[in-house]
Image (spheres, rainbow, N blue to C red):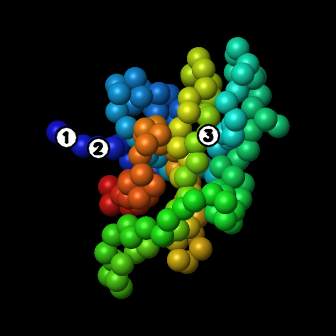
């Protein structure tokens, strides 16, 4: 079976050990995560993961809200798919962040993708896709989860 990316909703996306399992097999994921997921906006320099992730991190919901309104961060209006009432489009921005789950020996650099639909709905996903991956492709992967 050939595929480009594994997509999941936040129920599965919240599982850091599942994401590490996928990475260890050199597969690409783009998974929704709960809005209270915390990420580092700068690469951590500590030797070990802090026992309690706190002030040095930000919730993906807060980061997404800020980046979607920040005109300095490039984004795109992306056509995700054809819907019953015409094209389904969303405003999408993506930034690189670091995630350090309890299961990981060191922080992992990933994409954080924020998507705002025309009705105002906000979705946040993490992806281990390459740094060079175009935002349109990240957005389509994020939107593809709807069809799984």
Q: Residues within 10 Å of mark 3 (few under 14, many from 20)?
A: some
Q: Which mark is residue 2?
A: 1
Q: Which mark is residue 142?
A: none
Marks 1 and 3, how far apart at CA: 28 Å
Q: Which mark is residue 4?
A: 2
| x, y percent for residue 114 | 56, 57
Write down the residue under mark 3.
Answer: 97
Q: Residue at x 74, y 38 (%)?
A: 57
Marks 1 and 2, how far apart at CA: 7 Å
Asked if the residue under mark 2 is in contact with the one under mark 1, i.e. CB atoms within 8 Å, the reply is no
Q: Residue at x 57, y 22 (%)?
A: 104
Left or right: 18 in relation to 87 = right
Point out the tag, 1 or 3, that comes first from the N-terminus.
1
Q: Residue at x 39, y 70 (%)?
A: 79
> What SS does tag 2 mark?
loop
Which is nearer the eye, 143 or 78? Answer: 78
Left or right: 52 in relation to 145 = right
| x, y percent for residue 127 | 47, 42
Q: Is residue 51 visible?
A: yes
Left or right: 81 in relation to 135 = left
Asked if the residue under mark 3 is in contact with the one under mark 1, i.e. CB atoms within 8 Å, the reply is no
| x, y percent for residue 124 | 56, 54
């Amino acid at each position: 079976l050939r595929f480009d990316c594994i997509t999941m909703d936040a129920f599965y996306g919240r599982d850091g050990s599942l994401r590490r399992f996928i990475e260890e097999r050199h597969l690409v994921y783009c998974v929704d995560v709960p809005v209270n997921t915390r990420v580092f906006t700068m690469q951590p320099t500590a030797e070990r993961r802090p026992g309690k992730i706190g002030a040095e991190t930000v919730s993906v919901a807060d980061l997404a809200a800020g980046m979607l309104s920040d005109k300095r961060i490039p984004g795109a209006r992306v056509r995700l798919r054809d819907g019953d009432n015409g094209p389904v489009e969303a405003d999408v921005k993506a930034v690189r962040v670091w995630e350090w789950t309890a299961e990981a020996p060191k922080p992992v650099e990933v994409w954080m993708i924020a998507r705002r639909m025309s009705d105002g709905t906000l979705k946040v996903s993490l992806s281990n896709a390459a740094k060079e991956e175009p935002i349109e492709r990240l957005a389509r992967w994020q939107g593809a989860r709807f069809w799984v």
